[in-house]
Image (cartoon, coloured by chain):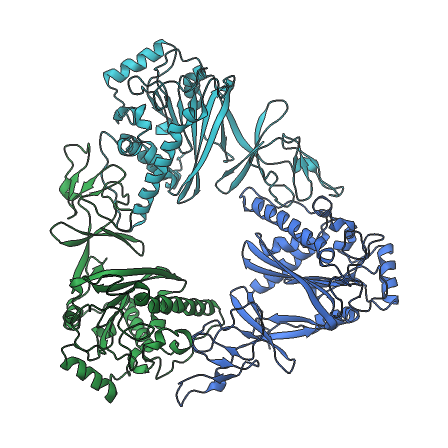
Chain colours: A green, B cyan, C blue
Amino acid sequence: MRFLRVGAYEVVIVRAQDGEIRAFQNTCRHRGSLICKEREGQVAKLVCPYHRWTYELDGTLIWAGDMGAEFDASKHGLKTVSLRHLDGLIYICLSDTPPDFESFAELAHRYLEVHDLANAKVAYTSTIVEKGNWKLVWENNRECYHCSSNHPSLCRSFSLDPEVAGVAADGSVSASLQAHFDRCEAAGAPAQFRLAGGGQFRLARMPLQANALSYTLDGKPAVARNLGRVAIPDAGPLLMFHYTTTWNHFLPDHSLTFRVMPISTTETEVTTTWLVNKDAVEGVDYDLKCLTEVWVATNNEDREVVETNQWGIFSPAYVPGPYSPDQESGVAQFVDWYVDRIEKALSPVRLVAG
Amino acid sequence: MRFLRVGAYEVVIVRAQDGEIRAFQNTCRHRGSLICKEREGQVAKLVCPYHRWTYELDGTLIWAGDMGAEFDASKHGLKTVSLRHLDGLIYICLSDTPPDFESFAELAHRYLEVHDLANAKVAYTSTIVEKGNWKLVWENNRECYHCSSNHPSLCRSFSLDPEVAGVAADGSVSASLQAHFDRCEAAGAPAQFRLAGGGQFRLARMPLQANALSYTLDGKPAVARNLGRVAIPDAGPLLMFHYTTTWNHFLPDHSLTFRVMPISTTETEVTTTWLVNKDAVEGVDYDLKCLTEVWVATNNEDREVVETNQWGIFSPAYVPGPYSPDQESGVAQFVDWYVDRIEKALSPVRLVAG
Amino acid sequence: MRFLRVGAYEVVIVRAQDGEIRAFQNTCRHRGSLICKEREGQVAKLVCPYHRWTYELDGTLIWAGDMGAEFDASKHGLKTVSLRHLDGLIYICLSDTPPDFESFAELAHRYLEVHDLANAKVAYTSTIVEKGNWKLVWENNRECYHCSSNHPSLCRSFSLDPEVAGVAADGSVSASLQAHFDRCEAAGAPAQFRLAGGGQFRLARMPLQANALSYTLDGKPAVARNLGRVAIPDAGPLLMFHYTTTWNHFLPDHSLTFRVMPISTTETEVTTTWLVNKDAVEGVDYDLKCLTEVWVATNNEDREVVETNQWGIFSPAYVPGPYSPDQESGVAQFVDWYVDRIEKALSPVRLVAG
């Protein structure tokens, strides 16, 4: 059982004994009390702490005391939340009419399969709160123009080539990057840059700096027992983002997921999860500090620049300036995508004449 | 002198040397400074700390320096707040046109007289803040459906019979409960269930669990020297509420008052006062821990469920569910009363044709 | 370099190597990040921490990486903030069209010249936050009706004569005060009471209590080496205010500036700066505690009464009372000036017929 706050919503995610994973609104169908209060744990049933209304892990109400003869328990099961699996990753959607997920799932599955996430375990999780709007968190993520002056440890492995963070607006790719894609693909690791879903998601397996194999200070792999079957040690990270809630780095030796959760207009929670092979043993196959230190530091450095950015933007004297055409094409892509989404949401629905 | 915050208002209650108790708006008639800042204490006059404007304990302005010949001190006395006594209890009302108090006072006086509260002293006061709307505090108070799973110490003495918290909507009373009322009344302790004032107040002397005489872990009286003249040791508590600010338990040996004060839409202050015979001596006639531990624990348990209830209700996915007809008739009564009051307040005033 | 928050604005004030002092909006012309984050310090250039855009101390953008051929750095210098010197004091204005400053500067210069502030050094700075609206801070400042009951240490030197804080509404001055003005002026220290700028600023050199020469507990000078050239030791403080941001006390031996900065509707930052002759040596020419203790205590006492005043004013029962004609003429002057300003700002602009 895991409990997640998504904006004003409270969601509980459970895996039943049959292995099925489901998500529910974490509010009792009686008087609305929160049911699960712990962040995570193991439970046999979901029992409301107020009056002991008891639900199965599939949401069915199985006990409610003294409710009288007319009470129909079948109409008071927990409200479900849409949930989808994708190669070991779980996506939820609070809408009653979730948007299309297939086009993303089909494409991403092709790239993710080789990473074998179903056989991963969580080595470490870090949650930080950045005092900045979630869009500033994304704008920060979508460029590495700021890296050289802010991320000393990340810069030992992550490439400063602007193509890695952005790729040109027309989708053209340099010859050297294309050679890297081709080499990965030939070895069975899908790599070609793909921006799809109207710009909502992106997949590409990008090279690290020469001689770097993973996000470590010395560039060596962080885990001796690989997670997945990427045959080329220097394939670099598969970079995958899906606006507005997650970006990910899947490396030959381990994988990283990042979850972006707005708390308020000026606070954003960022949760980073380090995944390793489920048979990897801490202290034998990997050293936890060595595995995590680069992104723990990088996240903290990004928090600092995002907060300072937000601080300045609060000033009524702030006016947006121009982007660097080379370095900030990814930021422009994010902003264009967001504006397009908002414009569509705000547009009146057109009636089609019959 | 006692200082009380009532919503945005600041009220000071004073007892003058003549024994008269009065309440005033605690804001200086000069430039508005708060006059009394201490929660309680003894003062000869009310002196504003800003410029020493000085008021008698009856609110008269008796000194204001350098105000010139045209200044009329008699027009700058403290604003009074309506105040009523009821057998040792004090009720205030901030309205300039307080609603009827007589119908409540006449009924309650009949029940309270035997408790002799004028000869009580305060043994202990506890103030807690529950992070929940005040209506959730009341809904929690008006049922004991939640007691068995949340109040282990209270359940040693308080009856789990739903009639005790609620009584049926049509006012009908079981034979065993009627027998208890009759026995108390015959012994001079008014007991019959009365819901009046359009549902705003309720009085009833309810039985405790068999063998329990007071709110203690072993069910024995908490105080050797009784407060009041209830002749039957197992008469149980006289339960009295008056929406929206107070519920009370008057036992043969001691009495409890609870004050409900909204601080914000999601915070409610609950103050509990333990009253004992003014001649009872702590350590001789009563042990303070034994006297207070059941309701200190119960209040804290209620705070927990109210806060968890509020937490779940914040979710946009929350929808109200059905009440238990047996267990939650008191909650329904409170909600109906409240909705009725709000509807009347929102209705346009009808003009009567002449 | 000094960084100042003015309401929602972030301002950085710098003195370049050529001695020129300038103020800028402290937000990068690229993506808006705050540039200077330290309260004060020394820098060769202003470098944005996000992407290293670099500005000269005159605001010129001199480096911005990878911005492409079409980027015009000359159009992306820091936005300037209007800044004026006045005898060693600095005034800034956030408006793009600052109001007239000359009439104040011309008058104040005549009074300030003798204080030689260009040769001052900062001996001490104190910043406190008063939980009250900034107008209550000013109302408190503009009368000494509250002094006798709140400021025991200030009352050892500051005069309780109401004329000192207020002067009569018609500008008439008592014979004894006029004699003091005349004596100062004859000795080369401008002193005559002047209220100008439609009531926005006031200058007057006011006497201290008999035998007091400075704001010390024993009334003796706090600094052996005078700041300025006021020839009469008992000239008292030149009192200068300029609504809404500053009042000042310039004494024969040292000077005090007070800056009033609203943080929110109910919080006001008050910064007090003690200035002494730049050649005065701490521990030799002055004792820091002796220099500062009277106003450190007085500010703290004023914070207490302002907060208590605000507390009472929050009550819906508060109604404004009358002012003391003798003691609170200064408060009335402030309120009248403020109301006049607001009325003018709210009035529709009149079109002049051609």
Can residue B100 be seen in this snapshot?
no
Task: Residue lying at the far left in this picture: please name it.
Answer: A18
Q: Is residue C183 left or right of residue A74?
A: right
Q: If the image is split into quadrants, where does the N terminus of chain C sit?
A: bottom right
Which residue corresponds to the image point at 22% horizontal and 31% vertical from the top-left?
B325
Task: Residue lying at the far top in this picture: please name it.
Answer: B186
Which residue corresponds to the image point at 62% horizontal and 81% vertical from the top-left?
C17
Residue A292 drawn at (x, y percent): 32, 66
With respect to residue C193, does A170 lie above or below?
below
Residue B131 drawn at (x, y percent): 39, 43
Which residue corresponds to the image point at 38% horizontal and 42% vertical from the top-left?
B133
Can residue C311 be seen in this snapshot?
yes
Q: If the image is split into quadrants, where does the C terminus of chain C sit?
A: bottom right
Image quarter of residue A125:
bottom left
Task: Residue lying at the far bottom in this picture: please name it.
Answer: C69
Image quarter of residue B65:
top right
Residue A321 drawn at (x, y percent): 43, 78
Q: Is residue C295 left or right of residue A347?
A: right
